[in-house]
């Protein structure tokens, strides 16, 4: 019998199957092309490679074979196909076959496969696999998050805001807020690594404490945001609302590895956004 066939996908056993599928396709279709793959521009100005399309095609086939009841939202699908899938009553897989394509094309070793299952207005499971480091982050809603089988937990004690490492995408923030963050930041150090999915996971693993982004697509945050929240982190939009999982419009994202840090981070953002 095909592995996973008939399994409730929101179980540890099915999550193991999904991890195996994602690891397999990444090692077969992504890593052999790393450093030796051309690209083309899509209509939105982003890059796509043969690795993106090969990963998506294989995972769509395998997921539909095991769980035919669910639709599929893949980054490399048409917008009409994506919208139709989101209206599926039983749920939809949300896939970014290669998050961090620009890094991949430029031989920067920071990219991932990201997969979530959306049901009842939000993600119920998420898998993000980093094939360079062999790290698989995964989560089940209400059951926890793990990195290579080890449970992820919130920090026992959060650092002061001024001691934090923040993952900041300046390009998609309003210029006034980006400028204020650049000139007078509330945190200790800033990074931007080029893969939203992995940045969510590194936040969940405590490798950074804060993040802010002005406009992520659904497949950028569907899996990673669940992994962070199941690890004890907090994620909202910039105005403090819940992240949207029912549409394709880009969303802002403000996150922290703990509630107290998120409150302090949100307060600083709110105060300074009002001054801009």
Image: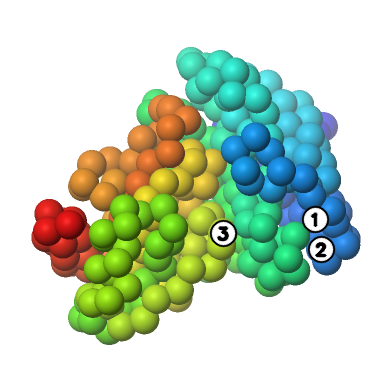
The answer to whether residue 47 is above or below residue 74 is below
Residue named by callout 1: 30
Q: Quadrant of residue 95?
A: top right
Q: Is residue 204 left or right of residue 236?
A: right
Q: Is residue 232 left or right of residue 88?
A: left
* Residue 1, position as x, y percentages in the image: 82, 32
Q: Earlier in the sequence, mark 2 or mark 3?
A: 2
Residue drawn at point x = 39 percent, y = 76 percent: 190
* Residue 226, position as x, y percentages in the image: 43, 49
The span from disc 1 to disc 3 (Cα, nearest Å) is: 15 Å
Q: Quadrant of residue 106?
A: bottom right
Q: Earlier in the sequence, mark 1 or mark 3?
A: 1
Q: Secondary structure at mark 2?
A: loop
Q: Is residue 259 left or right of residue 271?
A: right
Q: Mark 1 or mark 2, which is nearer to you?
A: 2
The answer to whether residue 203 is above or below residue 60 is below
The span from disc 1 to disc 2 (Cα, nearest Å) is: 6 Å
Q: Mark 1 or mark 3, which is nearer to you?
A: 3
Disc 2 crowd rating (10 Å Cα; few below 14, some 14-19, many 20+) is some
The answer to which of 100 and 1 lies nearer the viewer is 100
The answer to which of 10 and 45 lies nearer the viewer is 45
Residue named by callout 2: 34
Q: Which disc, if any, is residue 9?
A: none
In the rendered view of the protein, which quadrant contains the C terminus?
bottom left
Residue drawn at point x = 60 percent, y = 30 percent: 73
Q: Looking at the image, do the residues carrying marks 1 and 2 touch, with CB atoms under 8 Å apart?
A: yes
* Residue 240, position as x, y percentages in the image: 21, 47
Q: Which disc, if any, is residue 195?
A: 3
Q: How many numbered discs?
A: 3
């Amino acid at each position: 019998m095909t592995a996973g066939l008939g399994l409730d996908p929101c179980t540890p056993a099915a999550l193991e199957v999904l991890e195996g599928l994602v690891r397999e396709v990444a090692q077969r279709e992504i890593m052999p092309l790393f450093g030796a793959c051309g690209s083309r521009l899509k209509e939105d100005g982003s890059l796509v490679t043969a690795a993106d399309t090969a990963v998506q095609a294989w995972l769509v086939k395998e997921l539909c074979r095991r769980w035919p009841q669910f639709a599929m939202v893949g980054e490399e699908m048409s917008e009409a196909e994506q919208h139709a899938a989101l209206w599926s009553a039983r749920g939809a897989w949300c896939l970014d076959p290669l998050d961090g394509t620009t890094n991949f094309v430029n031989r920067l070793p920071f990219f991932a496969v990201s997969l979530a299952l959306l049901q009842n207005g939000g993600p119920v499971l998420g898998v993000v696999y980093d094939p360079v480091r062999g790290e698989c982050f995964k989560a089940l809603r209400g059951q926890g998050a793990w990195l290579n089988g080890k449970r992820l937990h919130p920090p026992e004690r959060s650092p002061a805001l001024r001691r934090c490492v923040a993952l900041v995408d300046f390009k998609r923030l309003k210029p006034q807020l980006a400028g204020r963050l650049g000139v007078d930041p509330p945190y200790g150090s800033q990074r931007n690594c080029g893969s939203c999915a992995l940045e969510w996971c590194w936040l969940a693993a405590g490798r950074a404490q804060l993040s802010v982004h002005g406009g992520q697509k659904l497949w950028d945050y569907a899996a990673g945001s669940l992994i962070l929240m199941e690890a004890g982190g907090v994620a909202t939009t910039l105005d403090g609302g819940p992240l949207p999982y029912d549409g394709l419009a880009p969303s802002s994202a403000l996150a922290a590895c703990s509630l107290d840090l998120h409150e302090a981070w949100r307060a600083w953002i709110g105060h300074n956004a009002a001054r801009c």
